[in-house]
Image (cartoon, grey):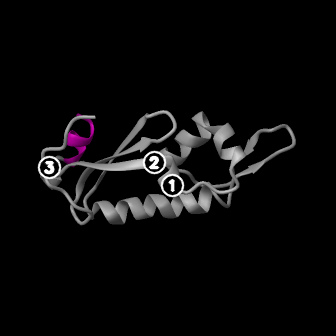
């Protein structure tokens, strides 16, 4: 990851990355509201899905009864064993979040894909 050149805080909008603490893969997203508000939404979905909705059937397969976003899909697809071994996994244990940049709001889509 490149060094961040702007001084950003949790109230800023812009581009952010969630970096998987297990494999280092990144999820890049954007928000026009504020980083804190957006990441809180990711945590809310994570807590409802990862920690309450995951159930395993007798064939050791995941039964997916919830709506999941990209950070959640990543862990279900790539880190099934880690999820199974823990009764509860906090999103802070799964991802490190970094605020990357604050482009003009009308250029968020371009900046996210750069």
Q: Residue at x 63, y 55 (%)?
A: 66
Q: Nearer the viewer, mark 3 or mark 2?
A: 2
- For label 2, the SS is strand
Magenta span includes 10: no
Question: Residue at label 2?
Answer: 95
Proximity of marks 2 and 1: CB atoms separated by less than 8 Å: yes
Q: Is residue 74 left or right of residue 52?
A: left
- For label 1, the SS is helix
Q: Which residues are magenta?
A: 108-114
Q: Is residue 90 left or right of residue 26?
A: right
Question: Residue at label 3?
Answer: 103
Question: Residue at label 1?
Answer: 91
Q: Position of residue 1 (x, y in %)?
A: 28, 34
Q: Position of residue 102 (x, y in %)?
A: 17, 52
| Residue 26 position by quadrant | top left
Q: Residue at x 20, y 41 (%)?
A: 111
Residue 71 is labelled as: none
């Amino acid at each position: 990851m490149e060094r961040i050149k702007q001084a950003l805080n949790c109230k800023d909008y812009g581009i952010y990355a969630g970096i998987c603490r297990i494999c280092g893969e990144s999820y890049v997203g954007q928000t026009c509201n504020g980083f804190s508000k957006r990441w809180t939404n990711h945590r809310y979905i994570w807590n409802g899905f990862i920690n309450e909705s995951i159930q395993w059937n007798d064939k050791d397969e995941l039964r997916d009864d919830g709506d999941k976003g990209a950070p959640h899909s990543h862990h279900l697809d790539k880190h099934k064993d880690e999820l199974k071994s823990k009764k509860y996994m906090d999103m802070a244990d799964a991802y490190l979040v970094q605020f990357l940049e604050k482009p003009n709001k009308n250029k968020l889509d371009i900046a996210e894909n750069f």
